[in-house]
Amino acid sequence: MSGEQRRKQLFQILSNSKEPISGAVLAQQLQVSRQIIVQDIALLRANGADILSASRGYVIMQTAHEVSRVFKMLHSDEQTEEELTLIIDLGGKVRDVFIYHRVYGIVRADMKIRSRRDIQDFMEKIRSGKSSLLKNVTSGYHYHTISADDDQTLDSIHKMLEEKGMLACLQEDEPVDFWNRAKISAKS
């Protein structure tokens, strides 16, 4: 079984379960190591699946009427607040940020930014801390999973980010399947 087929099967197993399933059980069912399961979960998340790591295992978060899309971004540190504010003001929510590192693979962090207050809290932590933005590890390139109530809202966000010059050009070897060659979504 290919990795793509395995991830589809993994997504189906999680979709059909109302309870969390441990990595060990998933590894046994799919006849792979737990580390492969962890990597597959990261790839599914990068493609928009809302998978939560609970204390008893993995579970898919059921969001009834929300859609999401991954955007590849490139902008300066100074534009970070503008980027987040634009997304929120147009009706989006910033679920996460992740980078594709050529050595470490996908490195992801939850953001859960839903309001201007969340943006202010995030920016204060960045400005006052010793850590910098995750995007700086990859020369400014990063991805956000953005969710909204409908595709039209995501289209508006895409258009505005494009107008502001904050979207990065996509490459054929992206870690996220922007071309939907093997579409995996919470609605599958």
Image (cartoon, rainbow, N blue to C red):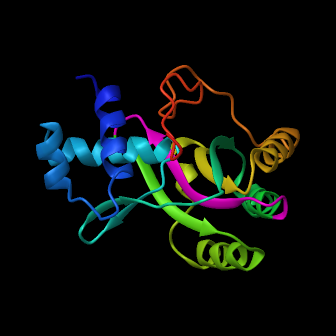
Q: x%, y% of residue 172?
A: 55, 19
102 relative position to 149: left or right: left
Q: x%, y% of residue 77?
A: 69, 57
Q: Name the foreground residue: 54 vs 134.
A: 54
The magenta segment: 89-103
Of 123 and 69, which appears nearest the observer? 69
Q: Relative to residue 135, is residue 129 depicted above or below?
A: below
| Magenta-drawn stretch contains 90 | yes
- Decide whether the magenta segment is chiefly helix, strand or loop: strand
At x 75% / y 64%, what residue is drawn? 81
At 65% from the left and 68% from the top, the residue drawn is 113
66 vs 56: above or below: above
How many numbered discs sit on the rendered protein?
A: 0
Q: Residue 126 versus residue 121: which sits nearer the camera?
A: 121
119 horizontally vs 161: left or right: left
Q: Please tell me which residue lies in front, 86 or 23.
A: 23
- Left or right of 140: which side holds 109? left
Residue occupying the point 37% across, 43% down: 11
Q: Position of residue 143 (x, y in %)?
A: 59, 45
Placement of 90 over or under 10, stated as above or below: below
